[in-house]
Structures are given as structure tokens and as C-alpha cells.
Image: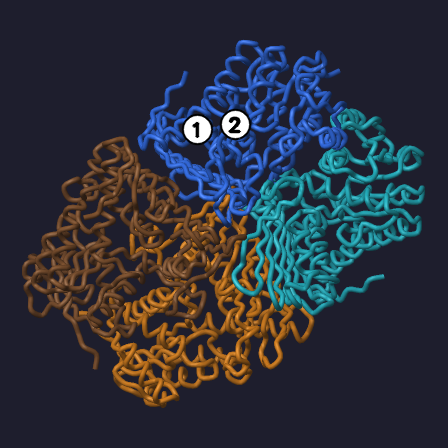
Chain colours: A orange, B brown, C blue, D cyan
Amino acid sequence: MTDTIGVAMLGYAFMGKAHSRAFHDVRLLDPPLQPELVSISGRNRERVEEARGRYGWTEAVTDWHEQVSDPRIGLFDNGGPNSLHAEPTVEAARNGKHVLCEKPLGRDAEESHTMWRAAEDAGVVHMCGFNYRFVPAIRRACELIESGALGEIAHFRARYLQSWGWDAPTDVWRFDRAQAGTGALGDLGAHIVDLARYLCGEVAAVAATVRSYVEGHEVDDAFVATVEFANGAIGTLESSRLALGRVNQNTFELNGSRGSIAFDLERFDELLVSDGGAYRSERVTGDWWPPGHGLGWGDTFTLEVRLLLEAIAGGGSVAPHGATFEDGYRAAEVCDAILRSEESGKKEVLEYR
Amino acid sequence: MTDTIGVAMLGYAFMGKAHSRAFHDVRLLDPPLQPELVSISGRNRERVEEARGRYGWTEAVTDWHEQVSDPRIGLFDNGGPNSLHAEPTVEAARNGKHVLCEKPLGRDAEESHTMWRAAEDAGVVHMCGFNYRFVPAIRRACELIESGALGEIAHFRARYLQSWGWDAPTDVWRFDRAQAGTGALGDLGAHIVDLARYLCGEVAAVAATVRSYVEGHEVDDAFVATVEFANGAIGTLESSRLALGRVNQNTFELNGSRGSIAFDLERFDELLVSDGGAYRSERVTGDWWPPGHGLGWGDTFTLEVRLLLEAIAGGGSVAPHGATFEDGYRAAEVCDAILRSEESGKKEVLEYR
Amino acid sequence: MTDTIGVAMLGYAFMGKAHSRAFHDVRLLDPPLQPELVSISGRNRERVEEARGRYGWTEAVTDWHEQVSDPRIGLFDNGGPNSLHAEPTVEAARNGKHVLCEKPLGRDAEESHTMWRAAEDAGVVHMCGFNYRFVPAIRRACELIESGALGEIAHFRARYLQSWGWDAPTDVWRFDRAQAGTGALGDLGAHIVDLARYLCGEVAAVAATVRSYVEGHEVDDAFVATVEFANGAIGTLESSRLALGRVNQNTFELNGSRGSIAFDLERFDELLVSDGGAYRSERVTGDWWPPGHGLGWGDTFTLEVRLLLEAIAGGGSVAPHGATFEDGYRAAEVCDAILRSEESGKKEVLEYR
Amino acid sequence: MTDTIGVAMLGYAFMGKAHSRAFHDVRLLDPPLQPELVSISGRNRERVEEARGRYGWTEAVTDWHEQVSDPRIGLFDNGGPNSLHAEPTVEAARNGKHVLCEKPLGRDAEESHTMWRAAEDAGVVHMCGFNYRFVPAIRRACELIESGALGEIAHFRARYLQSWGWDAPTDVWRFDRAQAGTGALGDLGAHIVDLARYLCGEVAAVAATVRSYVEGHEVDDAFVATVEFANGAIGTLESSRLALGRVNQNTFELNGSRGSIAFDLERFDELLVSDGGAYRSERVTGDWWPPGHGLGWGDTFTLEVRLLLEAIAGGGSVAPHGATFEDGYRAAEVCDAILRSEESGKKEVLEYR
């Protein structure tokens, strides 16, 4: 008999749906702990109730305080707006719940650091929802780098481009500074900052330009940055919500002294690999299905949740392949430095606490 | 309260896993009938029991006869080897169960026709598991064609290429004539024959060469065919298990008098669309997630099963977007004609019963 | 001092321009014989005179008979309409001129055979203008195959697709049976038949469907064919002038027992190469410029002409990398068999004279 | 009768070959002035003599002073090493010769400015050899932008990546500071800086990191930069000679408020164009040949030279589609600012003289 763990979820919208499906699907992946979907919360009574029914949660509540103190709950999953990340997550951790929080962890490095320390002090397992680490091709990229097959890393370049920003209603929460903190930076940039750190190592300095183009947007629409890594590699990072022609392009390339890799989310199952010569196009589809039968974007969350359950069951950490709250905090430091560089007009050297 | 339907599944291997996951996941797609996973069957007691536990079926049995007469069962799903498609499916239908059967429907047109007539005579809903119809980009292709946007169709070319045949152990059932019927033809070719019919209409004639290259293979490793459609279009079809460099490439292109479309399974989320001029690369990711966040191969089965449950609930058919047993039979006629053409050295005109 | 050779050209339109440029440019490639551009001919006095001036020919004439008996001429180059290929070329050869003739060699195998025998009997060097053999990536493909790196060949598939046929004026000579012989078959199909023979070896049998879709076209707009090679490989060939979205797509793939290659003219500098695993994308740009600095379509003619001049200077043949008149004849036999198969509804076995 | 112009060329290596071929080939493009290839110069007597013969120059000299004062010369073309760009070019201009100089114009902005002013003061036509402006797809990109079809420009990102730097002998002049000035920056970066200016307008500020990785290299191997344009757009620029897997990748993307374009030199004939929605892949092959029959890298020089001859014949300038010495100077200011930013750790605002 497999042990179970009670799960509570904050948020019923985009991430609420993605995480609910992950807890549902992970049951087929033979997890060491079977998740029991105890409760889902949200401010809108009607909508959270509908989500409860659709996604198979036992209860729907409108106050997350009920969740973080609920003795049935072993794992608190926060998929709410950025402004609601810190307080509930910290409180859940202090109550001994393991915690999963969507990215960006906090709205800035300060808030993120608080969350990390709270989780660490409480001794719970913590995970920040950088789901792209669970794309099979990206995991394979990480393994290639760690194997030394690419040699010393010289360059890392990444961009995350979407295009919905020109025409979107300006009253969505993602354009509101109080709720979102930042725009393309925290929403898209945080993902590629995390991938940069996951694949290339710690960021040492950044120089950046951050811009808002569309009237009514309180947050940034786009940023561009140069980046220097602790290992000596240099690179570029950029994100935009205004890149017409690109619906959801998350792409990177890494060049080492012995080889290179390149990935584009629009070709989910493909990793370009050079061992010094021409790129070859490897199909990387994971081990759910026979070779060449690929996963989908939503499945990255299922793999993420499986790793979290394994870490909880094993009493360990989701590192190195899962992102911890420390990873969430460190990504936030980089994002903050990008904003500071826009203010100062200088290269900003990272100082981690 | 949603009504429920009891499901029985024959087969616990590749397709057993894919279908089990589909019945599990479809619950999140608000189906009109909630599937209850009553029983799974297979000849190997130990393995079927393990599959039961892993995929969430209530019971495991080793004799499908128990399933087809089980009063708790409303839907019989056959994902077993090709040689086990006909008898259990026919019996289930005769017992009033709705039926889903993997492709190829039967091992030849004769067997497939029997299955179709049995299901039709029994008045049950029947579906043949041509899951690629449920790739969002392929559904979009169908809609474009039906809208008239491409004009009159002149050409359709498709190929389905894999490469595992050179090195695979020769004792797997897929190389055995008694169990598999045919090789690349029924396994891969049936899929593209179905897509040809789905997108371009009824096949009128074929001329083909069918070959086995690897010693110890009783069935074909590859075939090539020209095809003439009832609507006047001409094209080529080919499949191989010996195409090194191609892991699972299922690709087609259709040219009409006003536009064209092209698809490649290796770029699951992309449909190339020409309205007469240059191809544009449309991201087609369905409506589960925001635009640009794609599905996976396994999700095609979930969409397939949802359509089946809708047809059962609505008392109708899975046509035109789902494949019926008639579609399974007609695809088998084309496959048989391909084999006859290899024998005769002539173009074989299709005659449907 | 380099020896010189006097050249006469028939035709001043598309091929006249391409060949004139080749004789002009080849001077920079250190040829063993320097071409002297003596005369260009065409029926339209004004146009041929204009071409003379533009392309640097010394004389313009309206009667090719003047050229084939001109003692200054050592090489006769026929780039006229298909109906003017045989007579002038044969007469030139009989007068001891080396001959270059555009493809298709004759309008059918009979005419092509006559041309081949005449050139052979006259003991002159003969070349048929299958210029795609001179794309660096295709030459590299040939070398890979000859090296044995791909093992035994199992499949060859090629298509040559254009789209200008729907809207072109119906009075151009390419749609006229008397002048053109065939349509997409001789114009585009001949190229891929030659590549099939160049890369995969002799064709043993074909089965084909040939169609004309557009009113007013006396010749075929498209054909599809299966092909069996003498070495046991099977494949498909197709060409169309009605493939909207494709401007000039000449693409092939070859699968062997140890590896595969794939090429697309729309990616002129790229050869996909599999040594059994994933395709790698090799940049193949020839040796004119540093690696990665590519040639253009027109440069294939320059390389073609260089090989011809080398063969003339060396007293040899343009084989195996250049196409001889025998290659032109054999391609014509395949094209004729494709037409016969459309008539007979059968697979047509090739019989070469 | 067409007028002629005497041409002298400095340099017989890579650029000497490329320019010689351009002057040879331009004769077929009906130029308003026919170039006469009077003399080619270089320090190595034997090599320059060999180049003379191969490329069709009348004389070979070892002292460029003979060329810049030669009354037969109307156009002086400088394709020598960077350290030999300024003095001969300035002297030629002062002697009233029209001047073409390879990029980078001078080794820094100061030297480049001197060259520009000298040419301007002398009243001669001047052109800096940014040949990529003459790729048909890039010219088309420029026309689309100028037409307003893309709206206001928000982003421009470009990179130029090669990989030969890891293994090249360290004694080639391109790694020597005195001869080359800079490394990847002047060699590759200058090209994309020019394209940035050509397509997106004047550069207002840059922040950059510049690195040398390989022992024995006196110049930079790579740089990364953010860029702000006078029109408000932001972007990234980067170049490297250490990007394994990339032989010669010169790629950019530009996003505007109404559409986007993207180009990759490895797909020479293709321009991706978005009018707000999905990218379509336009074949852009210029007007030498029928649509879909592409040019090569070397042909960009032929088009460049044709424009220069037209400007000389017309008494005008090569602007806006050709790069003037002012363009060469302004690109140099950007490159200098990139180097200053590496030193200062700050964003450097451009100040043009």
C-alpha cells in the first residue's frame, strides 16, 4: 500500500488547472506518495467551486487560512497571483506543510528570500515551479553539460518571446504592478533566468534595458540583458510580450569548448546537439511512451510533482533537477539586478545573501 | 450529477497504457459520461495485475469473455494484439457494449468488415483508434479543407517512417504474420491511409510495392504506393520501419487549387498553411492551455475518448471527426489493395462492400 | 598559356542566360580550356542580338546550321526548347563538335537514344545538363553513398514541386505537347529521375499516375510514381507544377542499412546526414569560399561547365559525376515508362537498349 | 557603347577573390559603366601575380602607391587587411578615385572618421563593403520596414556566430591586434551593427561584455551587447568565433507593432514575415533567375559593385541601400562604444561627430 499525502491548492485559474491536472496524472507514474486532493481555494466562491468539481478536489474554500492550518494537509501548493505567493506559503511552511510555489517565487528578491528562509527554517520540502526544467529535452541538456561532453561553457543565450501584449485588455492582473510585481521580466524572464542558472551556473553580473511600450501597462513589456556567469561564460537574455509572430517561444543555445546544445520550446521534443561539428537533431521524448512519442507542456507539471513527492517521501530536497526556494530566491536576485541596471545604467554585480 | 459508464479494457501493454491514461485524464475534460474503470484483461496474470494497480482499474482478469458479458460494462475497449481484435470486439458488440478498437481494425478487410457489420447490427457506438485525427493541428487541417479554403484538392502525399526495424529482436509479435497480419503496412500505413481518407476523401485506386528486407521478418518492413482519390486527386503513401534518422515521422502535405497544408508529427504543434503564397507556420495547440502551450502524443487518446463518450451520451456516432468501424474497414480495404497490387503488378481499383 | 575552345550556344532565354553566365564565370575557376564565346543563336533576331551583347558572345545568328558547321566552334551548347534538342545536337556531333545539351535530352527515349548514339559514334564528349548533380550538398551525398557509409540502400524518395502552373498563360511553350513533349514529367521529373539514378542506381520498374488538371494544358501538370531499383531499393517520385506554397522544392531522402541522407533545394547549403542515429545538419558549401559561405543555383552550371571542359581537355567523359547523353537517354526511358504505366495501369519494367 | 572605368584592387586573398569575381560578373548585369580590371596589388609578388592571372587583372603590383596615382584608375577597391584600409584609401580618394573599402572601414571610429571625411572632401563616391545588405531577403526586409508594414519597431536582435576560433593557428592576422584592430567584434560584429543600423536606424546606446577565451588571441573572441536605438527600440547583439555547431550563422529578428521579420544566413533565400500572426516563410531569390532559384554568398558582392557603378555613373551616392563611408564610420562608433562599455561597466551613449 502506498502512503498518501493531503494536498491543498491556492488558485484555480491557469496554474490551478495545470497543477490540478499534474496531481491527477501523477497517480499513473507510480509515485511514492499518492496525493489526495483535499481542498482548493480562491476568492471567487462560484469559480472555485466549479474548479473543485472539474479537477476533482474534495473541498472548495475561499480563505487560504483554512488550508494552511488544516491537519489533513501535508503539501500546500500555491498557484495564485504573485502578490499572494509569500504570505500563505510562509504560513503553510511554518505550520509544517511542504510547499510548492509557482514562479516567480516572490515579487522581488527580498520577499523571495523571506520565503526561502521560512521554508528552510521550518524544515519542510520546498519547490519553486520552474516547470521547464522538466521538459525531457532540457533535462537531457543538463545531463550532457554535467557529463562534461560540452567542455567549458563559453556562451549562453536565451529568449522567451510572446506576442499577446499589444492587444490584451490593460486591466488584467499581469499588467498591474501591485499584483504582478513585474511584467515580461517576472513572467517570462524568470523562466530563462532559472534555465540559465540550471544549465550554466550562477549569474555573476547583468546589464539590462527594461521597457514598457504599451499605454496602460504598469509593468515592463520587454527586457534585454547581457549576463556574465561565475564560470566565465557570457550571454544574452531577453523576454517580450510584444514579439509578433512568436506565440510562446522559449529558446536557448549554449556553446562550450567541446560542443553545443540548442533548444526551442516550439520544437518540444527536439534537442540540437553538436559534439564540435554539425548540429544533430535528437528526438528527446522521455520514457513514458516509446521513442518519438512526445509529451506535452502540461506533462512537465506532472513530472515536477512526481519529483516533489519523491523528495517528500525520501526526506530530501528537489535539487538539483527541481528548483528549490533557494533557486527561486536566486532567480529573483537576478531579476532585481536587471531592474537595478535599468535604473543605474551600469552593469550590476550580483550579491546573494 | 454526471452519469457514469463502466469500461473494460483488453490489453495492458503499449495501447493498454495509452488508453488507461486517456480514461483517467478525460475526467478533467468535463465528459458527459464519467468512465468507471471496471476491469482490465490480459493473458499474463502477473502483468495484468500490475497494470490494474498502476492504471487504476478495479479488477484484473485473464479471460476477456468475463468482460464482454459483464453487466457492469457499457464500453469495451480493445487494445490487444491485432489477432485479438475481432472476436472479443464482435462479442462485446453483440452483448450491447459500445466498442472502441485499436487500429488496424481487423487483420484484413474481410475481418474488419465483419467487425463493422456486427457493431452496426448491434446498434452500438463504434470507434476505431485512429488517434492522429485528434492532433489539434490535424483537426485544424480538416477544418481548413472542409471550409473550402484550399479549393479543389490535387495532391496528397504522406509518409510514416520509423527506424527500429533493423535491430529489433525478430521474435516480437509485430514481425509475426499470424499475430500482426502485416508489418509497416498495418502498423504505420493504416494511420496514413486513415488520414488520407479523413483529409482527402475516399481512395479509388492504388499501385504499390511492398517489401521485407530484414531476415526473419514474416511481415513487410516497408511499402510505397501511388494513390488515386475519388475526387481526382493523386498522391503517394509510404511507410517504413527501416528509415534510419526518423524515429517517428508521420508527415503529410496536401495541395489544393487555392492553398496547401503540411504537417509533421515531429513538429506536433505546427501546421504549415498556404493560401496560395508562402507557407506560414501556424501554432495549433488546442484549447486546453493558453495559445502556444502544446499537447502531447498521449493527449490525442484523451480527446479521442472524450468524443467517444460524447457520442455514447448523445446516442450518435463518432463521425466525422472520429473514425468509426466503417472507417477502419475502409482503411483495411486500401491496405488489402496495396498487398494485391504488390502481387498483381497492377493498379488495383478499390471496391467497397 | 591555356588552350582555348570556341563555344556556340543555341538559345538565349532562361537556359541561354544560365549557360552564358557559366561560360563567363568558369574563367575564374582555372579551367584547362578557356572558353571563347563565339556565337549565340535564336529565331528572334532582335532578342538574340540583345542576348549577344548582354552575355558577351561575339556573334548572334538566327540559324543554328551556321553554328554546327563553324570551324571556330569546338563545343556546341544546346539550351533551346525541347523540340530543338535533337537535330542541331546530332548535327554538331557529326561535325565533330563536343556537345552539351539541356535536359530532357530528347522528347522521348527514342529521340534521346538517337542523340546518345550519334554523339558516341562521333567520338565527341557529351554532357546532358542535369545541373543539380553539381550542388555541393548533392555531390557530398553521392560521395557518402559511394563510401559505403550508408550501407545497402533500402529507400529513395524524391519530389520536385513548383506552383506556377495554376495561373500561367496557357500559351507558353512548356504547355505545348509538340514543343515540350511532356510537362512536369520532363521539366521537373527528369531532374529527380536523374538524381535517383545518380544516387541510388539504375531504375528497374515504375508504376505511375500522370495527370493534367488545368484546362488548356496539353501536357501533364503532375505525376506520382513508385519506383523499384536494380539494387532492390524501393521509393517514390513525384513532380507537380500545382503545389501551392512550394516555389521550387527539389527534395529527396535516401535510407540505407547504416545511415540516411536528406536534401532540400530550398536549403541549398545543407545536407542532413544520419549515421544510424539522429540527423545532423551539415553545412556543405563547396570550396570556392570559406566554410559556410554558400553558392547559388546559377553556380551549379559553372561547375558543370568546368567538368565538361576538363573532360574535353583530358579526352575523357564527364561520368560519373556529370551526366552523359547515356544518362540523358536512360532518364528518358524512365520517363517513358512512367507514361506507359499511366496508359497500362501496370508496373512497367525498364528495358534499356 | 557603354563607358568604362578602370579599377585597381588592393588585396588578393579572401576579399580580393570575392571582389575580383564581382567585377567579373557584374558585366552580365548591364552596368552603366564597364569595369576594366587594371591592376591588383599585394606584398607577396608571387601570390599577387598568380591572383592577377586567375582573376583577370591586367597588371600585378606590390606597391599600392602605384595604384592610387595611376591615371588609368577611376575606382580604387581596398580589400586588404584592416591595418591597410586607411592610408591607401585616403590617398586614392585625395587623388580623385572613387573608393570601395572592405569592412570594418578603419580599425576604430577615429580612423574611420578620417576616411569618411577624406572621401567626402574629395567629392568621390565612397562605399563600405557591408555586402549582406545585398542579400535579396535582407533588401526585402528593408523594403518591408520602410513601407510601414511592420509598424513601430520595438525589438531588434542579431547574432553572428562562427566556430573556427577554437582550433585556428594563433598566428593568423585576424588574431593580431595591430593588424586586425579587434576580433569577432570588427570581423562579425561590424556586419550586424551595420544591419541593425540599416534596418532599425541609428544606435543610441550600448552596454556590452567583450571576451577573449583562447590563449594567444590578442583580440576578442566574442562579445554580447544590449542596444538601444534612437527610435526607442531595444535589442541584443552578439558575435562569436567560438560557437561550435555554427559555421557561419548571421541571423536577426525584428519585431514591430504590426509585424515582424526574421532572417538566417544559413537559409539564404528565406525571409520569415509576420503581419501580426504566424510567420510565413517567403522565398526571396532576387530577379536574376525565375522565382525559387537562389543566389549565392558571392553574388552579394556583384550586386554591391553594380550599385557602386550606378552611383558613380549617376554622380550620386550608394545610399540608402549601399553603405557609405559614413555608415562605416558610424558602425565603428558603435563598435568603439562596445569596447568602452566593457571597460567602464556602464551603458555607453553614442555621440557621433
- Vertical position of residue A189 compared to residue D28: above or below: below
Q: Which residue is drawn at the image coordinates 25% and 49% (left, top)?
A: B331
Q: Quadrant of residue D232?
A: bottom right
Q: CA distance from mark 1 to mark 2?
A: 10 Å
> Where is residue D62 drawn, in percent x and y?
85, 30
Check disc 2 and report its element: helix, strand or loop. loop
> Where is residue A158 drawn, in percent x and y?
54, 60
Q: Are marks 1 and 2 in contact (CB under 8 Å)?
A: yes
Q: Quadrant of residue A217?
A: bottom right
The residue beneath circle 1 is: C335
The residue beneath circle 2 is: C104
- In the picture, measured across the screen, residue C65 lies left or right of residue C261, that is right
Badge 1 crowding class, 10 Å Cα cut-off, few under 14, some 14 to 19, many 20 or more, is: many
Badge 2 crowding class, 10 Å Cα cut-off, few under 14, some 14 to 19, many 20 or more, is: many
Query: As shown in the figure, which amino acid type bears the numbered disc 1?
Result: Cys
Chain letter behind tag 1: C
> Where is residue C81 drawn, in percent x and y?
58, 29
Q: Which residue is drawn at the image coordinates 38% and 43% (left, top)?
A: B234
Residue C171, numbered label: none
- Vertical position of residue B131 compared to residue D41: above or below: below
Query: As shown in the figure, which amino acid type bears the numbered disc 2?
Result: Pro
* Foreground of the two, A277 or D171: A277
* Foreground of the two, C21 or A320: C21
Query: Which of pointers 1 and 2 lies earlier in the amino acid sequence?
Result: 2
